[in-house]
Amino acid sequence: MMITLQLLNVVKVVESESKAEALEAKGFKRVELPEKTKGKAGTADKPAE
């Protein structure tokens, strides 16, 4: 599982909880990314015809 963290305009992706905690100690905040959905791109917001 990859963990994404952000500090201002810097985004880092780490593999372990310990690395994430080290970055959080430096001021980084965890970023919740939306789950990837199956299907074609760009069709999620379009109403069914």
Image (cartoon, helix red, strand yellow):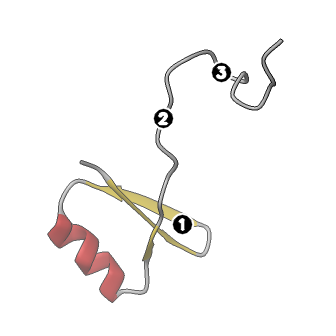
Q: Is residue 13 left or right of residue 21?
A: right
Q: Is residue 46 left or right of residue 43?
A: right
Q: Amino acid at mark 2?
A: Lys
The image quadrant of residue 9 is bottom right
Contact check, label 1 and label 3, Cβ < 8 Å: no
10 Å neighbourhood of mark 1: few (<14), some, or many (≥20)?
few
What residue would you read off at disc 1?
Answer: 10
Residue for point 16% across, 71% down: 18
In the displayed structure, 35 sits above or below 15; it is: above
Residue 30: percent from the left, percent from the top?
42, 70
Residue for point 56% across, 17% down: 39
10 Å neighbourhood of mark 2: few (<14), some, or many (≥20)?
few
Q: Secondary structure at mark 3?
A: loop
Query: Reading the chain from its start, which is encountered first: label 1 or label 3?
Result: 1
10 Å neighbourhood of mark 3: few (<14), some, or many (≥20)?
few
Q: Is residue 34 left or right of residue 46?
A: left
Q: Secondary structure at mark 1?
A: strand
